[in-house]
Image: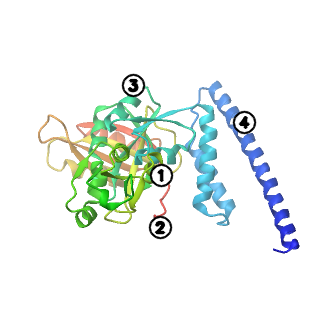
Amino acid sequence: MTESNKENIGKVRNRIDEIDDTVLALIKERLKCAKEIGRLKSRDNRAKWDPLRERQIYDRLTRLNNSEFPAEPLYSIFHEIITTCRLSQKPIEVAYLGPEATFSHLAAVKYFGHSADYRPIQTIEDVFYEVERGRCQYGIVPLENSIEGSVTSSLDAFMKCNVKICGEEFLNIKHNLVNFSGNMDDVKKVVSHSQPLAQCRQWLRKHLKNIPTQTVFSTGAAAQMAADDHSVAAIASSLAIKTYQLQVVVKGIEDYSGNTTRFVLIGKESPSKSGRDKTSLLISFHDRPGALNETLSILARRNINLTRIESRPIKGEAGKYIFFLDLMGHIEDGIIEEGCERLQESCYFFEWIGSYPQARQLTPNP
């Protein structure tokens, strides 16, 4: 390297240091401003979280960026800054299906960044109870998977617990076969949650057809077992590899590409409008011909987009079902409010379980 090049590199590096110093100073100033906003909101007893304001920030930054900085890293950087500033106004605890390094843990960190206090809980139902009883402000639970469908334990818990959906997050799922050694020959048993085992069923049949599988309550628990018993392999997340000091046997063993899980954030109250929202309902029909068609007509006549409908049996009542509906829009939108009022009049059972910001669209895994 010539002396001239060394000098030029030195100058550019000095400029980078100056920029980093400026960025740090501005981030610290932003944090102070966020704390002041929190103090002013507390005076008026206003909610600390303003989804519309956050969406406006992201939209404005995206326009200003004009695609010069890669979009996903830009969002990740500002998401961490914004959530850290918001949580400086009021620290929160988030319950998730534990132990550490489950996909629920990954989804929670993706949603809140690294500044929240995360609490691992043993079952999905217990996550609901932690929130309902006020021991955690929020919980995050899987609701549906693009391959295996609905997570029934989450759906059933909504019928038992008085909580609201406050947000949603989509997570691209990559399943890794991991163990202590990283050697396939050491695998004598494969353990995981029932969903990953189902999502990797064909791969397991082809490559480990004589190896037994065992269902455990979470992928994190499976990773713990693999760390403790070197004859066990787990199907687990990338975070589990670092957390439990495991080795990858095979990456990406899911049977289908595009494997995505939708998680929902639960809390005691849903947030205000963001401008791009969903509303979720629980309803049950009167037992008479045309009840389902009448319900769908109420929505269709008002041009309300029904994006999901799912039925679950009502425990202890043979032949009776409750339906989970997702609608595009917020309960504060006039047309959604009107539609819900009409549904409430026509249905045997009606419960609004939340209006919340839509999750950002995922970019596929490479």
Mark 3 residue type: Arg
Query: In front: 123, or 326?
Result: 123
Residue bearing the label numbered 4: 32
User: Where 332 sits versus 276, above or below?
Assistant: above
Residue bearing the label numbered 1: 359
Q: Is there a contact, CB below 8 Å, between mark 1 and mark 2? A: no
Q: Is there a contact, CB below 8 Å, between mark 4 and mark 1? A: no
At numbered mark 4, what does the secondary structure look like: helix, strand or loop? Answer: helix
Q: Is there a contact, CB below 8 Å, between mark 3 and mark 2? A: no
Cα separation, mark 3 vs mark 2, equals: 41 Å
Residue 74 seen in this snapshot = yes
Residue 302: give x, y in percent of width and height. 37, 52
Cα separation, mark 3 vs mark 1, equals: 26 Å
Residue 226: give x, y in percent of width and height. 35, 48
Residue at screen point 41% across, 42% down: 337
Residue bearing the label numbered 2: 366
Residue at screen point 82% across, 63% down: 12
Residue bearing the label numbered 3: 133
Residue at screen point 65% across, 55% down: 60
Q: Residues within 10 Å of mark 3 (few under 14, many from 20)?
A: few
Q: Earlier in the sequence, mark 3 or mark 2?
A: 3
At numbered mark 1, what does the secondary structure look like: helix, strand or loop? Answer: loop
At numbered mark 3, what does the secondary structure look like: helix, strand or loop? Answer: loop
Q: Nearer the viewer, mark 3 or mark 2?
A: 2
Residue 303 seen in this snapshot = no
